[in-house]
Image (spheres, rainbow, N blue to C red):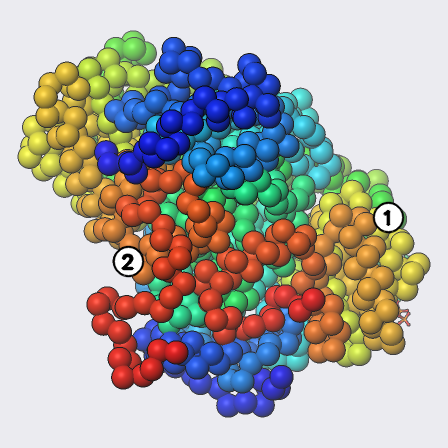
Amino acid sequence: MTDTQTIAAMRPASTQDVADILMDAARKGEPLAVRGNGTRTGLGNPVRATRVLELGGLNAIDFYDPDDLVIRAGVGVTLDEVEQLLAQKGQYLPFEPPRYAGLYGTDSARCTLGGAVATALSGPRRILTGAARDFVLGVEGVNGQGDVFKAGGRTMKNVTGYDLSKLVTGSNGTLAALTTVTIKVLPAPRAEVTLVLPATSVEEDVALFARMRALPLGIGGLARRVNAAGVCEVLVRVEGSVPGVAGNQQILNSLLATRGPMQVLEQAESQSLWAGVRELTCLHARPDELVWRVNLPATTMPAFVEQARKAGCINRFFVDWAGGVVFSTMRGVQPEVDTLRYRKMAEQAGARATILRAPDAVLTQFGAFPPVSAGVAALAARTRAAFDPAGILNPGRMTVQA
Amino acid sequence: MQMPEPSQAILSQRDALAQGLRKIVGKDWVISDDAQRRPYQCDGITAYMAMPLLVVLPGCAEEVQAVLRFCHEKGVKIVPRGSGTSLSGGALPLEDGVLLVTSRLCNVLAVDEHNRVARVQPGVPNIKITEAVSHLGLCYMPDPSSQLISTIGGNVAENAGGVHCLKYGVTANHILGIQAVLMTGEMVELGGAYLGAAEGELDLMGVLTGSEGLLAVVTEIAVRLEPVPEVARVISMSFPSVEEACACVGAIIGAGIIPAGLEFMDRKVLDAVSVLIKEKFDDRTAALLLCELDGTAVEVDALVGVVSDVARGQGAIEIKVSTTEEERQRIWSSRKLAFSAIGKLCPDYYCTDGTIPRNKLPEVLNKMADMSRKYGLDYANCFHAGDGNLHPIIMYDAAKPGDLEKAEEFGADVLIACVDAGGVLSGEHGIGVEKRDLMTHQFTEIDLQQQQMVKCAFDPKDLLNPGKMFPTLCRCAEFGRMHVHNGNLRFADIPRF
Ligand SMILES: Cc1cc2nc3c(=O)[nH]c(=O)nc-3n(C[C@H](O)[C@H](O)[C@H](O)COP(=O)(O)OP(=O)(O)OC[C@H]3O[C@@H](n4cnc5c(N)ncnc54)[C@H](O)[C@@H]3O)c2cc1C
Ligand SMILES: Cc1cc2nc3c(=O)[nH]c(=O)nc-3n(C[C@H](O)[C@H](O)[C@H](O)COP(=O)(O)OP(=O)(O)OC[C@H]3O[C@@H](n4cnc5c(N)ncnc54)[C@H](O)[C@@H]3O)c2cc1C
């Protein structure tokens, strides 16, 4: 394996160039590390590649049609640029794509839209508005044979042919080098308020989340974290129209009255608080710690966390998605042993434990992404081969060799 | 409609196959006599019919596995079927194929109130899910108009939409996990019964959703449940012209409002329904929009005000807002009855579902008027305006020679116009056999080949619902090889291997 960080990257400026590069690589059977601007190469397994294909140069916005809630852009357009453009029209990317630049020590301003689609990372708002996969309307990409293909479209509804747009979303560059993506956008809520209240036990807090979520209150964020002062607190974000949020806040006030003193954060303050949740800064992961994301049913979360903390597999953690995801750190003292134990615990809880950050050796041995059944793994391998028969696109990114 | 030539060898083994299948599902659940097979000859498109070789009704997922394994071994094709309401011929039987019907797989297996998930079998009618959870204040959001009959398995296979998908999304946005059986009989579990259960794996569930029964038979589904909105109110807005109504659609969304539903009906539809609902529409009305807003009472009241203002600004003649649930139901009844009302005006009608960018609505609607003149067939329009999903209703008389063909050509022209306007062939009904041969208008050969390669990964023998969705059968063996790009091999001087 070559360290892909140090290889000079090929940085094509057009889809045709990407196709030529891939066709050439396919012919030579030469594996490529595919990336946007390389701000999140830490996510996923190290790639066994000899050259780097960097798509950050495909950075033109094809069109943005606010009345039709759609934008199509080259994959290299930065998330910052997209979000600023949308904000001018009062719109946003509802899946709130995390950058994780802090996590990987990279430059958040360089995170690309293509990377957001390829990693399918979704922020705290997922419980209300959905995930990255729910907003990808269409893609153009180049498969492992150098063929330029498109899938999906730009309309809000589309069932024409297989939904390959969903399939490539979250495929971490293993199916195709994406060149353009078409994304559904939404009007940003006019009002946003976050209620901050003292946490109690994890069980009680999760039960509280369930009670709140049973009501149609437009809750676009429910998290539990330790704040800078070391105090554990519950965060409730309410979004919508100005009168709607005011009304919903009243309902929540009475529901939460017994919870002790409540702090109310509005607009910018609320936004920066949730940026911290989205970017996992509230985890305060130390550089030598591993960082994990565990997806699980909210109801099994408290017992899982309790067990994992006792076992020393969780050092710090916070909870997002109303308890449906636990972000945690693991001390880097004996990462191999702890990784194996943590994964086992997750498996027993019916959870999926993804390593967001770890030393290469750990990722190569255990895989960043949780294992799937043999049947699903085989089907996934056949599906990858349908795009990339020679296995030249990000080989090993999502799978570990048995 | 050209379908793959039935295999004589398979047809001749009918009795033996029936016997083999009876061993798996029990003798009552294999239908082989003509009279009982007849109701299964078509789905929602009655223009296309074929007698299935046999009809099999498995009673559990294991039986589905065994049936598929058996048919795979014998090289027999399978067509999955839910309730047969598909409007694209997706469930059209094959004469040499076994129709696998999911009606007996009709249980809601579990409701997890706290994680807001229900696990259901594929044959459960869509509405039954909401009925099973409504006492908890929850519902299953996607609501195709066929929801009383169409199954959740069929909804997953077609990625069905509904009136409320503008705000809440289509089927794919509400599926958390799928258990499915491949043609070989192998079972796969994708995702699971909680949000995020599929994180970090290839989104095979995403591609299975909307795959029209070509990739696998879905045997269990975990769906997301949502709290029922506290109130819903509908605004009926009439306009003196189609253009003004269309402009209002864009203006509402441009104002930052995503209604729960936003439907369009033209004058012909209004005239047809006014007989049924005994209500007259203002003479000046050329088109009517129904806009549903939901949420909490305060929120909805505020939005009703904004939308009414927008509509007035766009030239609305009359604006009616429901103040009670009864009024809301009454206003909606015009939309709900639209298709049956048109059905009373003509012997037959044909409805496609091309989808376009919203701002292209006037342009494409105008083209339709030209086409109507060209084919000499009347038409009406009643569609999901909020997401640009057209449902032109083309009226014809199947008894008149040539009428059906004209209607089909008219429909095809509309779909081509949709694609040319930057849209797609189908917003929610799927490709099936109906739009199959138009796929080349939307996709290049390479696009289609990439899709068919995925089919090969799931079903290399092309036994699962073949002849649907793609204008040509899969040639899985050939696809793997290096191929020619638009007739030219690039870098022709470079050695290929
Ligand atoms: C009722 C209850 C609920 C709890 N819930 C959580 C929880 O949801 N998540 C969780 O991680 N722990 C939780 N804890 C545990 C508690 O916060 C731990 O003491 C903390 O994580 C300490 O970890 P440490 O030993 O690595 O850090 P320490 O050695 O105690 O501290 C190292 C340094 O890091 C700072 N620090 C430690 N943790 C954090 C943090 N999370 N955010 C900011 N700065 C920090 C400290 O202030 C200190 O400067 C809970 C404890 C109780 C009693
Ligand atoms: C009056 C009417 C109104 C309609 N309104 C809408 C609407 O508003 N929105 C909308 O989207 N559609 C609508 N439809 C179309 C239709 O109802 C949907 O496509 C529905 O999802 C089909 O469900 P079904 O159970 O009838 O499936 P069928 O028609 O039996 O099958 C449809 C397809 O799904 C496949 N299939 C079925 N079950 C499975 C399974 N378990 N595993 C794998 N494949 C399977 C079949 O092979 C076939 O290709 C309407 C139809 C009618 C007749």
Quick one: SS at disc 2? helix
Residue name at image x 11 percent, y 18 percent = B400
Q: Farthest residue to the right: give it.
A: A310
User: Circle 1 sits in a helix, a strand or a loop, which is it?
Assistant: helix
Q: Which residue is mark 1?
A: A303
**CA gap, disc 2 and disc 1:** 53 Å
Q: Which quadrant would the C terminus of chain A be assigned to in this image?
A: bottom right
Label 2 chain ID: B
- Give coordinates of residue B188: x percent, y percent: 61, 45
| Above or below A339: residue B324 | above
Q: Is residue A190 above or below residue A174?
A: above
Q: Position of residue B33 (x, y in %)?
A: 42, 13
> How busy is the neighbourhood of tag 1: few (under 14 within 10 Å), some, or many (20 plus)?
few
Q: For mark 2, does the 10 Å Cα neighbourhood hold few (<14), some (14 to 19), or many (20 or more) residues?
A: some
Label pair 2/1, CB-CB below 8 angstroms: no
Tag of residue A60: none
- The chain letter under disc 1 is A
The part of the image, by quadrant, that contains residue A231 is bottom right
How far across and down, in percent of the image, does residue A176 sit?
45, 67
Q: Which mark is residue B445?
A: 2
Where is the N terminus of chain A found, in terms of image quarters? bottom right
Q: Residue at x 56, y 72 (%)?
A: A395
Residue B230, horizontal then vertical, whole percent: 58, 29
| Residue that appears at 16% across and 26% down | B404
